[in-house]
Image: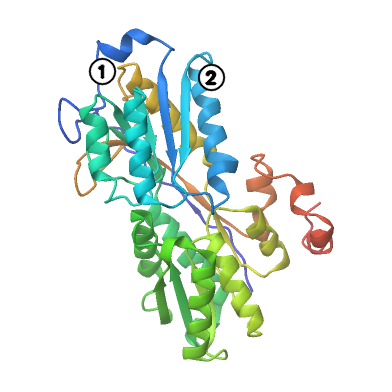
Amino acid sequence: MRRAAVAIAAGAMAVSLAACGSADEADGGSDSTGSAAKGDNIKVGLLLPENKTARYEKFDRPLIEKKIGELTNNKAEIQYNNARQDANLQAQQVDTMITNKVDVLILDAVDAKAIQNAVQKAVDAGIKVVAYDRLAEGPISAYTSFDNVSVGKTQGEAMLTALGDKAKDGQIVMMNGSVTDPNAAQFKEGAHSVLDGKVTVGKEYDTKEWAPEAANANMESAISALGKDKIIGVYSANDGMAGGVITALKSAGIDVPVTGQDAELAAVQRIVTGDQYMSVYKPYAPEADAAAEMAVALAKGESLDSVAKDKVSSGSANDVPSVLVPVTSLTQENINDTVIKDGVYTIDEICTAKYKAACDKIGLK
């Protein structure tokens, strides 16, 4: 297979700050009263959606907490909770943050639509909300994520590169993410914009809760329906699902390119061995830093003009000040230049005894 690294940069257009939601409650502008008088002694709530995906506890949480500490001379109080993929639990966690009177909330929603009422309650209590990674509904004051349509495009382009002249020789299976995650719809949109007309999609699934076991079951169904000799590739929207997909493929004796996302360690190791073709490397530090910077600014009543250069709109808020971070296609060829160079993993972490021979084969030393 030919392999190529596809770098996608999210375009940033300088814009002036504009209100989102209620002009009095959810704008990202300055506020000379309330939390502004607290200086660095602010209280930040951090709510992450689940712990099945390795990134949230390994990267997002420590990076956000570290940056908030740097921005507040370690005087900020950070209250953290993980919803464990339970939308009702996350709504209760928002209530707890309101009771604890946090000044600002960084929220990565389990269910972007279901969280809307909780966001409104927080804003009504005077708490600004920064939507993190997923564009939550409600009067949010800021948003940071990656260019999610470009993520899907990156995956689709990598699949076409991997298939080459074989793109018309069979069918691919598309393993999309959860319908409760608005990012999943954008990944799907981006992938289809590249793949449609160039490959035949034999089966397509929206995977419940992004669960690897659900992806595994779906893949087994696809193999049964299409026949193992007809499948030429699998679009998997993230690495966790890719793991479930690859287990099913191996059990059926199928070796085809599989995409992914998040550059999880297990996925990088699968890329080293050739079991997974690519992942989308999303540098978490810029995303986490942006969330921390916007949260601290909002808690202090400061403008977001110097941080947020983009604007996005959701179903319930328009022109939300936003930071969109570029992504890169991660293949065997650029492991050194991405996750190792950025300090996400070391060679020793990737090239354990089980993977040493594969690492040596591709020159990863």
Q: In this view, does 178 lie to the left or right of 7?
A: left
Q: Quadrant of the N terminus?
A: bottom right
Q: Residue at x 79, y 57 (%)?
A: 363
Residue 265 locus on image (x, y percent): 66, 53
Residue 95 locus on image (x, y percent): 32, 35
| Residue in front for this viewpoint, 184 or 286 | 184
Tell me whether the residue at label 2 lies in contact with that at label 1, contact meaning CB atoms closer than 8 angstroms: no
Of marks 2 and 1, which one's residue comes earlier in the chain? 1
Q: In this view, does 100 lie to the left or right of 347?
A: left
| Residue in front for this viewpoint, 50 or 326 | 50
Q: Residue at x 24, y 24 (%)?
A: 126
Q: Distance between the residues labelled 2 and 1?
A: 21 Å
Q: Can residue 21 be seen in this view?
A: yes
Residue found at the far left of this picture: 23
Residue 302 sits above or below residue 203 on the image: above
Residue receiving disc 2: 70
Residue 156 locus on image (x, y percent): 46, 67
- Quarter of the image for residue 32 reads top left
Query: Amino acid under label 2?
Result: Glu
